[in-house]
Structure formats: C-alpha cells, structure tokens
Amino acid sequence: MATSNDLLIKQRSIIEFLAAEGCSAANIHARMKTVYGEMCISDCAVRKWVRIFKGEDPRETILRDRKCSGRPLSASVTAHREKVDYMIRANRRVKQKEIANAVGISKERVHHIVTTVLGYRKVSVHWVPRQVTVEMN
C-alpha cells in the first residue's frame, strides 16, 4: 500500500499532466475526486499546484517538496541526553526546571528526554527507570 507521501506525489503528477493539457483546476479536481475519493487532495491544493505548473517546463518540474531550512533539533542530541541522565543519577530528586537551566534547553525537551528517550518516570519525588531490571539492582 502506498504511503500518504507517495499518494500526494502521484496526485501532483496527475495535476501536472492535466494542467499541461490545458484542463481547468476545477475539472482536474473533479476527475481526481472520482478516482481517489476521500484520499483526494483539496480543491484549494489543486488550484495551488495548477498555478505552479502553469508556466513551467514539464521536463523541469520538481514534484517533491523542497527541503526547508529550519531550526535543527539540537535539544535532543546525545550530549544533552547524557547530561540529563547524569544529573538524574546524581540526584533522583532533581526537578525538570533545574535540569533545563543547567543544560540550557527547554523544560518540554527535558521532559521528552527524561520520559521518552531515557524511560524514567516520577515515583513520589524520585525519578526511577520505567522498568527495573536485574542489572539495575
């Protein structure tokens, strides 16, 4: 079964082909709706892609989304995980706010690292591993 990203790229290629033939955006959406049903992209998205494809050479069109330059996820790097784990092992009563201030990341990232990545949970006021194994005793 195709993923949603594969389906989106297929639909964009159909839009590109029909726009090159001169079909209107409304006609393209109606034709795609009969084939894809509920999985069809919206009329607004079809109009957007028709505008993009009109005036471009079909041989040079890129159907995949371009990479966006955004802020990298630097808060979950290994160094931060190790610092958080070290602080919890040194003081099981440490607060997430204290960890966030010491490491220099947000409280939300600390919570994600502590609960999801490291697998700790709060019991009373102590951080303990989610599952205690024989090696931990």
Image (cartoon, helix red, strand yellow):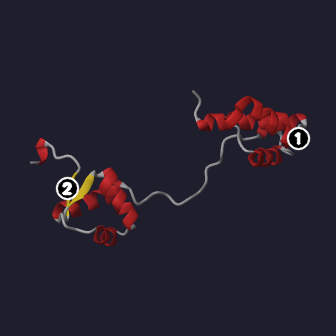
Residue lying furthest top in this view? 1
Identify residue type, mark 2. Answer: Val
Q: Secondary structure at mark 1?
A: loop
Q: Is residue 114 left or right of residue 124?
A: right
**Residue 10 percent across, percent down from the top left:** 69, 33
Residue drawn 27% across and 57% down? 82
The crowding category of the residue bearing disc 2, from other C-alpha atoms within 10 Å (few below 14, some 14 to 19, many at least 20), is: some
- Sequence-wise, the earlier of marks 2 and 1 is 1
Please tell me in which quadrant of the rendered image residue 86 appears: bottom left
- On the image, numbered disc 1 is attached to which residue? 24
- On the image, numbered disc 2 is attached to which residue? 128
Tally of numbered tags = 2
**Disc 2/disc 1 C-alpha distance (Å):** 61 Å
Mark number, residue 100:
none
Identify residue type, mark 1. Answer: Ser
Residue drawn 61% across and 54% down? 68
**Residue 39 percent across, percent down from the top left:** 66, 36
Q: Is residue 53 above or below residue 121?
A: above
Please tell me in which quadrant of the rendered image residue 37 appears: top right
**Residue 91 in view, yes or no:** yes
Q: Is residue 72 left or right of residue 103?
A: right
Please tell me in which quadrant of the rendered image residue 25 appears: top right
Q: Nearer the viewer, residue 2 or 58?
A: 2
Q: The N terminus appears in which quarter of the rendering?
A: top right
The crowding category of the residue bearing disc 1, from other C-alpha atoms within 10 Å (few below 14, some 14 to 19, many at least 20), is: some
**Residue 64 percent across, percent down from the top left:** 66, 41
Q: Secondary structure at mark 2?
A: strand
Q: Is residue 81 left or right of residue 30?
A: left
Residue drawn 85% across and 44% down? 54
